[in-house]
Image (cartoon, rainbow, N blue to C red):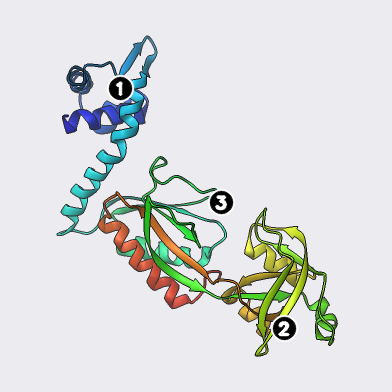
Amino acid sequence: MNMDALQDFISVITHGSFSAASRATVTPKASISRRIRQLEDELQTRLFERTNTGFALTSEGAMLFERVKPLVNELSDIKTDMMEQTASPSGKLRVSVPPVIAFDTLGKAAARYRELYPLVELELVADSRLVDPIREGFDAVLRVNPKVDEEMIGVKIFRETLVFVASLQYRERLAAAEPVTGLPFISIGTHWQPTQFSTVWEGEPREFKVNTELYISSPFITRSTIISGFGSALLPEALVADDIKENRLISLGVSEDPELILWCLYPSRRYVTGRLRAFIDLLAETFAQSKSIGR
C-alpha cells in the first residue's frame, strides 16, 4: 500500500473532510482524492461513502483506520527520530498523567523539558481514568503501581514510602497503652475499604484497626483534611514529612504495605522516539532531585 495514500486516508478522517485535510497538509485536494481512489482500487473495496455534506466511513474503512493509524504514526516517529540524530528532538509528545501525583514536580519537569527541547510540543493530560494510549493517541502514560499489561513496557521513575498519619486530635488516644481501634480512616480511592494496618512505629511493629469513613481521590485534599482535624490515611512520606516535623500531623509509622512506584509506560510495539527518551530521562532526574511525588 502506498504510504502517502495511507497518510491521506488518515488525514481526511482526522480533520473531518477532504478540504480540511488539504488545508492541514498543504496538499491539493485533487491529489488526496486521487490517491485514496487508488488505495480503494488496490484494496478492491470502498473506504468512504460520499454524501452531499461530506463522507461516512464504510465498515472496511473503519477497520483499516483502526489498524493502520498506529502503524503510520510509528513510521512517522521513526522518520522524525532518525532526523533527530543530527538535530534537536521535535514533534508532538502527548503523555497521560494521573492527577494524584506530584503536580509541582511534573511542572518543574515540563518547564525544564520545554527549555531544553523547544521544538517539541509537549502535552500533559491529567486524567483519573485509565486511558488507552494506543487508541487515544498517547505516547506514554504515568502510572503508580500499575497492573501488568502485556501491551505496555516502561521505566521505573520513582519510588516512595507510605506513612500512616493521623490528625492531632487523636494524640491522647494514640498515646494510650491500650490498642487503638476504630480510628477514622480516609481512603484514597472509591473501592478500597481497609479495616486494619501494620506499621513500624518508633522501631516497633504496631497494629491499628480503622473505620473507613471518607473517600477522597486526591492525596493533597486528604492531607489537608487530616490537618484540619479529621481522620487518618496512608500518604507518601515526602508529602507529609514537613507536617510531621512541624507538628501538624502525627506519624503512626511506616506502612508495611508495598511502596508507591511511579512508572512511565509506553506501548510495547511502538518505537520509542528521541523526544520520549529525553522526557523519561528528565523526569527521572527531576524526581530524584526533588525526592518527592507530592511537593
Q: Which residue is mark 2?
A: 247
Residue at x 45% of width, y 71% of height: 158
Residue 67 picture location, percent across and down: 31, 34
Read off the residue under disc 3. 128
Secondary structure found at label 3:
loop
Check disc 1 and report the residue beneath it. Answer: 19
- Asked whether 211 or 231 is in front, the reply is 211
Dot 3: within a 10 Å radius of its alpha carbon, few (fewer than 14), some, or many (20 or more) residues? few
Compute the Cα span from label 2 to label 1: 64 Å
Is 156 above or below relative to 44?
Answer: below
Residue type at mark 2: give it: Asn
Q: Residue at x 18, y 47 (%)?
A: 79
Q: Position of residue 167 (x, y in %)?
A: 77, 74
Q: Are marks 3 and 1 in contact (CB under 8 Å)?
A: no
Direction from residue 111 to residue 68 in the image, left or right:
left
**In the image: residue 187, left or right of residue 1:** right
| Marks 3 and 1, how far apart at CA | 36 Å
x and y, in percent, of residue 16 in the image = 37, 25
Task: Identify the image quadrant of the C terminus.
Answer: bottom right
185 or 21, nearer to the observer = 185
- The image shows residue 289, relative to residue 94, as above or below, that is below
- First in sequence: mark 2 vs mark 1: 1
Say which residue appears at 41% left-offset and 60% top-offset. 264
- Which quadrant is home to the N terminus? top left
What kind of residue is marked 3? Answer: Ser
